[in-house]
Amino acid sequence: MADVIRVVKGDEKPDIVLTLTDEATGGAIDLSAASTSVSIKFRKQNSTTVLSTISTVKVGTGATGQVQFDFSGNVLDVDAGMYEGEVIITFNTDVQTVYDLIRFRVRDSF
């Protein structure tokens, strides 16, 4: 996940779609079980303080490993700068944290 998602302070969109894959097999992680959920912890880069926890929704049944999220709930009411997201998959009671971070660049609006 080397790309940087560029967003504007105060916005609630765009909708971002992630495809979660198994690094060993390259196949999609099956998220279709009703008890499986995915969330993203959002923080300023080089900080330990979580500013928001972003909920996601499964795309289709979730069997393709895809989830979608946006920035509703004032997630982007932050200072301009670099931010990062940590993706957490919860399978019933088991937790898997995705190793790579999502990178965000927030710029001020006009």
Image (cartoon, rainbow, N blue to C red):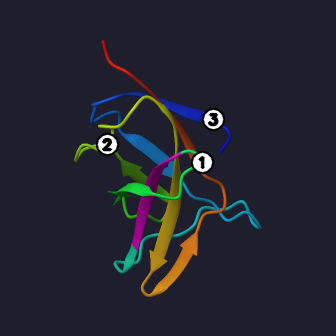
Numbered range of the magenta stretch: 37-44
Q: Circle 2: is it few (<14), some (14-19), or many (20+) Cα within 10 Å?
A: some
96 lies left or right of 90: right
Q: Amino acid at mark 3?
A: Asp
Residue at (58% x, 69% y) in the render: 97
Tag 2 secondary structure: loop
Give the left or right position of residue 15, taking residue 83 as reference. left
Q: Earlier in the sequence, mark 1 or mark 2?
A: 1
Left or right, 57 with respect to 81, comes to left
Q: Which residue carries the number 1 mark?
A: 46
How would you rate the neighbour count of disc 1 (Cα within 10 Å): few for under 14, some for 14-19, many for 20 or more?
Answer: few
Residue extending furthest bottom?
93
Q: CA distance from mark 1 to mark 2?
A: 21 Å
Q: Where residue 87 sits: x, y (%)?
A: 51, 60
Location of residue 58 with respect to 3 vertically, above or below: below
Circle 1 SS class: loop
- Name which residue lies at 34% across and 78% down: 34
Residue behind mark 2:
71
Residue that extends furthest to the left in the rendered view of this protein: 73
Residue 4 is inside the magenta segment: no
Residue depth check, mark 1 versus mark 2: number of the one nearer the observer: 1
Residue 99 percent coordinates (x, y): 66, 62
Q: Nearer the viewer, mark 1 or mark 3?
A: 1
Q: Is residue 64 visible?
A: no
- In which quadrant will I find the N terminus? top right
In front of the other: 99 or 68: 99
Secondary structure beneath disc 3? loop
